[in-house]
Each structure stands twice: as structure tokens, then as C-alpha cells.
Amino acid sequence: MTISRSILFLVLASFSFACEQKNTTPDPRLNQPEDFKKLLDAHGDWKKWIDAKAFSFAMVHETNLAWENHYISLQDRKVRIDADTWQIGNDGEKVWISPNRQAFQGNSVRFYHNLYFYFFSIPYIFTDPGVKVNKFENKLLNGISYEAFEVSFEENVGDSSKDKYFMLVDPETGKLAWVLYTVTFFDKSNTKMNALKYEDYRNAGGLVFPRVMTGYQFENDSTKGLNYQVSFSDVFLLEEPLDEDLFKMPEKNAVVAN
């Protein structure tokens, strides 16, 4: 009995030590270049993003007033989007749409399912493993010189590891002002840049997010025609995970989509 209790004590002690070690090990995402940390700090306590389990927000397309509610599991990037005439989800294995593919008018459901989540989460999401953020020479946009960061990805990170981003910093606030980006999902050789403006930041649980994002065509260091504009509300960063059933593909009236 004494020996058994001794073994049990050692097992519990080892388990306790392992848990303590696990809890005290710094998250590698906290290890960012100092210049990038300065940008992150300007947006609030960005460690809250590292610790959060889930994220949700409401979004409106200002060009046609179509609405969407987005729900994201931050640890595994499962996604659910509810719109007026369709639902899109990523259950960790596949991307699906309900009630059918024809309900969504875009070119690719897979491309769309995390598009606005990704843009809306910059700069926090660039702390992800496999993302490389480096200080870059100042970039000119509409006649204004901005401090800039170049963002690239390691091979096989996400669906579009060839994408290129530049974050442009507001000289007055130190916050993200613009993102210049390429889209290689449909054409891996594409180098055409687009411009995305971030404005009217609002606090949500200790972090700030833009209330409005406006996408423009970009040419010769200047914005051209309007591509889209979206607005956001009801932004929540959650410490508890969302129900897994939220992301499951419905048994009826749903199809796997690319």
C-alpha cells in the first residue's frame, strides 16, 4: 500500500510538473521583431489575441447592404459565416456551403470563407507561425510616405503562400493605415497590388479593430477605382471556445465547395 501510494504521488507530482511546465512555456507567437511589436502595441494589448479561443463579428457590404455574421475558432481556424441566403463553413477538413453552391455568387467559396476574417485581423494574425514580418523601406501612397513592413509566408502556409503584403503605418497614431497586397489564389504568378484602407478604429476587449475597410485598385503608388467597402460591428474576442457543432456541415441542403 505504501509503495502504491508512493507511485501515485510520483505520478501526480510528474503530472503537476508537466502542467506547470506547459502553462509557463511562452507562446512562440509572442516572439516578434521589435519594430513589429511596436506596431502591435499601438493596437492595444495584442497578447489578448494570442490567448483568445474564438472571434466573432458582424459585417455589412456597403455597396449593396448585404450582411454577414462571422464566427471563427482561433486555435484551429474553423469558420462559420451566416448570410441572408447562405451559410458557409470550414469544419477543419472541408469547406461547405448551404443550401447549395448556386446560393453564393463569388468565384470560390474556399477563397471567400476566411477572406474578411484575415483582413480584419491584421496586424494580429501576422503573429501566426510561418509568417515573416520585416521592416521595409518607406512606401509612397497617394503622395504620402509611410513606414512599411513587408509580410511573406513560408512554403505551404495556407492556400496562398505566394501572397505578398505590405503594412503601412499611420505616422500620427502608429496604427495600421493601409495594407497593400497581392492575390495568388487564382494565379500564383500574379503580382498586381491592391490597396486596403483601415479607418475609424474601435476598441473591442482591449484591442482595436477598424470599423471600416475600403478596398481600392492600386497603380503607380496611387489608389484608383473603388473595389469594395465593408463595415464592422459587434466585435467579440472570446476566452472560451465556440461550440464545435457550429462548424459542422449540415446533413441536408449543404455541399462541399471549392
Image (cartoon, rainbow, N blue to C red):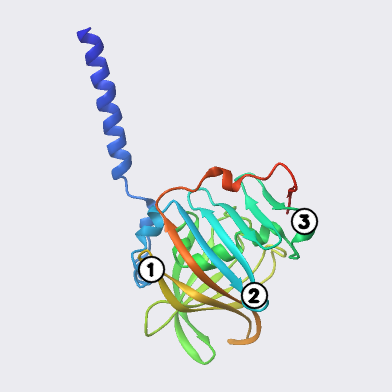
Label 2, on which residue? 65
Name the residue carrying label 3.
Answer: 101
Amino acid type at circle 1 is Leu
Judged by depth in the image, the label closer to the viewer, 1 or 2, is: 2
Mark closer to the chain start, 1 or 3: 1
Q: Is residue 104 left or right of residue 204?
A: right
Element carrying mark 3: helix
The earlier-in-sequence mark between 1 and 2 is 1
Of badges 1 and 3, nearer the viewer stands 3
Q: Quadrant of residue 46?
A: bottom left
Badge 2: how crowded within 10 Å, few (<14), some, or many (20+)? few
One can see residue 201 in this view: yes
Tell me the number on the disc at residue 40.
Answer: 1
- Element carrying mark 1: helix
Q: Amino acid at mark 2?
A: Leu
| CA distance separating discs 1 and 3 | 38 Å
Which mark, residue 91?
none
Q: Residues within 10 Å of mark 1 (few under 14, many from 20)?
A: many
Residue at image coords 27%, 24%: 12
Q: Quadrant of the N terminus?
A: top left
